[in-house]
Image (spheres, helix red, strand yellow):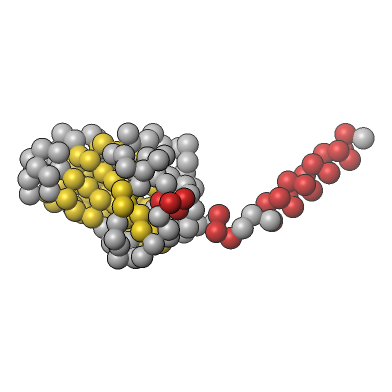
Amino acid sequence: MHAKRLMVVLGILIAGLLMVPSTALATTENQSYDFYFSGTGATQGTGGVKKDTSSECFISIEQLTMESLYLYIDGSIFRDGPWINRTGASGGGTAVARETGYFLIRNNVKKTSGSYARLTGMSPAGSGYISGEWSPDTNQSGWWPYLV
């Protein structure tokens, strides 16, 4: 009896996995970024990248020469903008980088702004440099801390 129930449950789980829409299997290939900031308020941004899901963005910070740096996930319906800050659960927020490592950034690009995202950085004070990789979609939710 238990074996039969187990087979039914496994069958339901497998059928559910097969019904996952292809958009949930997003491209999670990392894109490199390399920003130099010439002074307070200076900004740099990547080009637009297709965002397939409403997942967080992944960011690897490999070099950071500043005490802190503001990061934003911008969204647009077009690959080249115009861009709107969609950082955080409701958009308009800021993610603050203070150290190297692997992180996630909450955003609502897919829910509100369409299909493209970009990573933007802004210097809150002085000059500096940041580099690493990022992905607009991630399959690593829960693996890394959030930048807030």
The answer to whether 9 is drawn above or below residue 74 in the figure is above
Q: Residue at x 10, y 38 (%)?
A: 125
Q: How many marks?
A: 0
The answer to whether 4 is drawn above or below residue 25 in the figure is above
Where residue 40 appears, as percent x and y from the top left, is 9, 42
Q: Residue at x 43, y 60 (%)?
A: 115
Q: Residue at x 28, y 39 (%)?
A: 94
Which of the image's four quarters has the C terminus?
top left
Asked if one can make out residue 32 in the rendered structure from this viewpoint, the answer is: no
The answer to whether 141 is drawn above or below residue 81 in the figure is above
Where residue 35 appears, as percent x and y from the top left, is 18, 52
> Is residue 14 shown left or right of residue 142?
right
For this rendering, which residue is in front, 117 or 30? Answer: 117
Which of the image's four quarters has the N terminus?
top right
Asked if one can make out residue 26 in the rendered structure from this viewpoint, the answer is: yes
> Is residue 7 shown left or right of residue 55?
right
Where residue 21 appears, as percent x and y from the top left, is 61, 58
